[in-house]
Image: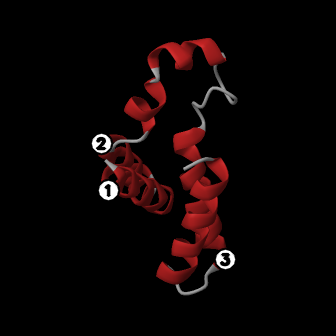
Amino acid sequence: MNLHTHIILALAFGLIFFHNDITLAVLVGIGAAIPDLDREYVLTKRKIFAKYQLHRALFHNIFFALAVVYLNFYLGFALLISSIYFISMI
């Protein structure tokens, strides 16, 4: 999944799960963007991630998602969706 599909999937789940509440769906969409903030085109140089591929290990795991759920349920909800989807792809 890339940044756009993270956000679109989370918005859809947010609208369904929170009964068409746009505000909460947008928070879920923002939470879905969090795992891709460390992508090579956002915060770091491409060479670092090409060499180590830390992106998946750092932000696409259930432990990071659970920590965010503890801080903010709606943002964490999107991370959990993305983490569960990623685990199902393995």
Viewed as shown, does residue 89 lie left or right of 19?
Answer: left
Asked whether 31 or 87 is in front, the reply is: 87
Amino acid of disc 2? Phe
Marks 1 and 3, Cα distance to the nearest angstrom?
A: 28 Å
Where in the figure is residue 25, as x and y percent of width and height? 60, 71
Quick check: marks 3 and 2 in contact, CB under 8 Å? no
> Eyeballing the image, is 85 above or below 22?
above
Q: Which mark is residue 22?
A: 3
Residue at the front extreme?
90
Q: Which mark is residue 65?
A: none
Q: Secondary structure at mark 3?
A: helix
Viewed as shown, does residue 13 lie left or right of 65?
Answer: right
Q: Which residue is at 48% across, 59% downward? A: 78
The local crowd at label 3, few if under 14, some if 14 to 19, many if 20 or more residues have their Cα within 10 Å, is few
Where in the figure is residue 3, as x and y percent of width and height? 63, 48
Q: Secondary structure at mark 2?
A: helix
Amino acid of disc 1? Ser
Q: Which mark is residue 63?
A: 2
Who comes first in sequence, dot 1 or dot 3? 3
Q: Which residue is at 30% across, 42% downward? A: 63
Q: Which residue is at 61% across, 12% downward? A: 47
Amino acid of disc 3? Ile
> Eyeballing the image, is 34 above or below 45?
below
Q: Which residue is at 66% across, 25% downward? A: 43
Where in the figure is residue 26, as x and y percent of width and height? 65, 66
